[in-house]
Image (spheres, rainbow, N blue to C red):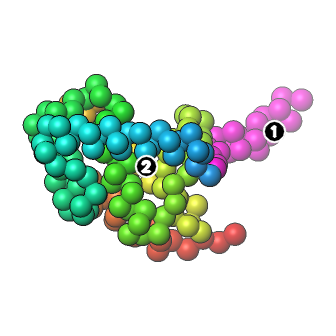
Amino acid sequence: MRFLALALLLILAPVSIADPWRTDPITPLDEKYMEDSRNELNDLSRIELGRSFGESRDNDLRLIQTLLDRKLVNGEQTRLLQAMGIILGDYLQKEHQLKWVIYTDRLGRSRALEVPFKDEAIFPVTQISSRAAVGGDIDVQAIYQRLEEEIKRAKKKIIVR
């Protein structure tokens, strides 16, 4: 009996270790949250710097960096920090033909960008906020470039089904 239990445990162990995840379409509520977050960050930028988002990718990355460097957004302002990540994601989405999705795994639910046909997702929304929360240095351009490299790597993967 013990042998049978041990054999069953060894057979089922890899299944229990697997980290199941799924993606779902972005919801209207998520779209509203993202839009409101972008608008809140844009309002702050207009008030504090006299500049708006939306001119170009390079301009927006510099604008995010300026907001951070001048400490106009701090590590406790998660919504504004995540709005910065949403803006990064918007450019990645357009430039690399990705789509916003809801990624759900055992840790919870996240807004992510899905790389089509590759079973891969990237998470730009939390790239800045996670660093700011621990007081880390934030190089917005470097983060953006790293995310682009992740996308290129994912697109080169061969998926066999």
Disc 1 element: helix
The residue to which callout 1 is attached is 8
Residue 130: in magenta span: no
Badge 2 amino acid: Phe
Position of residue 72 measured from the top left corner of the image (x, y, whole percent): 16, 33
Badge 1: residue crowd in 10 Å (few <14, some 14–19, many ≥20): few
CA–CA distance in space, label 2 to label 1: 37 Å
Numbered marks: total: 2
Disc 2 element: loop
Q: Which secondary structure is most common in the magenta stretch? A: helix
Check whether the beta carbons of the residues at disc 2 and disc 1 lie within 8 A of each other. no
Q: Nearer the viewer, residue 30 or 15?
A: 30
Residue 13: in magenta span: yes
Answer left or right for 31 relative to 83: right
Per the rendering, the mark at residue 36 is none
From this view, report whether residue 130 is shown above or below residue 51: above
Answer left or right for 136 relative to 98: left
Position of residue 31 measured from the top left corner of the image (x, y, whole percent): 51, 46
Badge 1 amino acid: Leu
Answer left or right for 105 relative to 59: right
The residue shown at (60%, 45%) is 27
The residue to which callout 2 is attached is 123
Q: Nearer the viewer, residue 161 or 11?
A: 161
Quadrant of the frame with the C terminus: bottom right
The residue shown at (34%, 51%) is 87
Q: Answer with the quarter of the image where residue 130 lies.
A: top left
Q: Nearer the viewer, residue 7 or 64?
A: 64
Which residues lie in the magenta part?
A: 1-24
From this view, report whether residue 157 is shown above or below residue 141: below
Q: Residue lying at the far left in this picture: please name it.
A: 70
Position of residue 139 measured from the top left corner of the image (x, y, whole percent): 18, 49
